Amino acid sequence: MAKEIKLSDLLKMFNKKGSQFRLTTHREINLVPEIKDEMIKALKLRNLIFFACIIVASASVGVTLFFGTIVGGQSIAINSKTSAIDELSNKIKNYKELSDYLTIRGQVDNIDSTTNNKRMVSRTFDILLAMMPRNEDEIKISTLNIDTTGGSPILRMEAQANAGVEPYIDYRVFDGFQKSMKYLTYDYGRYRDKYDKDIPTYCIIESDNDGVQFKTQEGGYYGLWTIDAEGCDPSATQDDDGKVTSTANEYELEEYNGQKVVRIWRTPQLSWYHSTPPKENEPNMTEDGVISNVAHFNSECIKYKVELRDEKASKIDGTDNSCHLVTGGDEGAKKLDSSNGRSESNELVLRFEMEITLEPGAYAFNSHHFMAIPPQSRYNVTDSYVQVQNMFAKKARDCTSDDVDCKSETNKNGGN
């Protein structure tokens, strides 16, 4: 029968001092049940999660304290600002001139919009001067109404046409007047100095006391620049001491009504064109109409070009005008009614009612230095405002029952 030996005794036997045998290797035997091993792992995981929760909670507390400090500071700042606002509000309420100030401030803020929407109805006289016939044919206006409520201004007129030939009523006069409307143009723009800076409008004189625009015998049209007037020299310089140095010495000065003025051409001059590069500060105009080194008028409507002959400028063509005075072409001038009648001087006339629709730019405030131009691109410079009164006449009276000539429907040209 085999003798049982304990494992511990066996180990002592082999490891005993002086023994010939020593156990140099051993095998570990796991005597812990598997379920207890799983429990140990779970405890370790629990401890790890608990530790992570402690870290997260600590961080949350820190963040809460941080934002709490910010919110508290904001509350203090808001309360301080609220007190300041209440204090200012009480001061404003006690300011007696507040309503007047707000009214003035509101008007100042609306200056730009008011200016842009402003209509220059006074230009009607310039427009009528360009519209009326220039020969023996005569148009007289008895009633004129100007409607600016819409986008395009509308002229409604009652007028009378007279060819000056008895006893026939000439419908040709009215037909010519109506058909000429689509050929009317206008021009506007800004006067500029030699440095290409805009000159204020109030610094330019364009006509004499009778309303006649300035023109040379050679046919050049110009304006007068009051360069020495306050605020009229856009290129003037100012030093640190506030001393202003004008550029007047760079121009040829003239005298007009006791003022020093500079003549600025509204129409370009042939002498400005150079086939070779011009000298420094010499007036220059390219073949395409670009002007430099001279005070000039910069048109927003008319495009000029130089016509050359043997590399020399023969003339300046300015017939390309993109601004038509009457909108809608043939439909821009409509006849509403017509009939025969007798004028105040007992002449036979054709009475008519007409509606003419103008371009919005014709009355626009920002259309600086406006000029109405009759057909054939003739500038209206030979007429003065004194002649405007000749455009109007008393309304023609109806034909009487016994006035055979007045009731005739036959005109000079054989039409009805």
Image (cartoon, grey):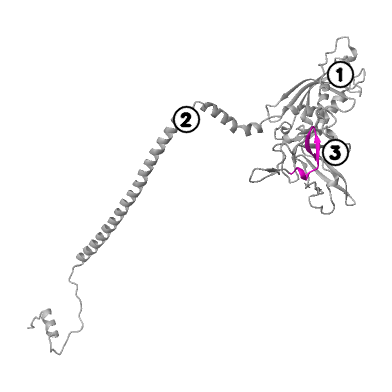
Q: Find out whether residue 264 is within the magenta segment.
A: yes
Element carrying mark 3? loop
- In the image, residue 115 sits, relative to residue 198, either above or below, namely above
Q: Which mark is residue 349?
A: 1
On the image, the x and y values in percent for residue 396 come to 83, 16
Which residue is found at the position 46% from the left and 27% from the top?
94
Return the disc, 1 or 2, that comes first in the chain's sequence.
2
Quarter that holds the C terminus: top right
Magenta residues (range): 247-265
* Quarter of the image where one finds residue 134: top right
Q: Which mark is residue 92?
A: 2
- In the image, residue 286 sits, relative to residue 47, either above or below, namely above
Which residue is found at the position 76% from the left and 34% from the top?
370
Element carrying mark 1? strand
Q: Residues within 10 Å of mark 2 (few under 14, many from 20)?
A: few
Q: Residues within 10 Å of mark 3 (few under 14, many from 20)?
A: few
* Quarter of the image where one finds residue 213: top right
Cβ–Cβ below 8 Å for labels 1 and 3?
Answer: no
On the image, the x and y values in percent for residue 375 come to 84, 33
On the rendered structure, is 67 left or right of 242?
A: left
Q: Residues within 10 Å of mark 1 (few under 14, many from 20)?
A: many
Return the disc, 1 or 3, that comes first in the chain's sequence.
3
Mark 2 to mark 3: distance in Å?
Answer: 61 Å
Amino acid of disc 2: Ile
Amino acid of disc 3: Gly
**Which numbered mark, 2 or 3, is in the foreground of this view?**
2
Residue that carries the numbered disc 3 in the rendered image = 220
Return the disc, 2 or 3, that comes first in the chain's sequence.
2
* Quarter of the image where one finds residue 31: bottom left
Amino acid of disc 1: Val
Element carrying mark 2? helix
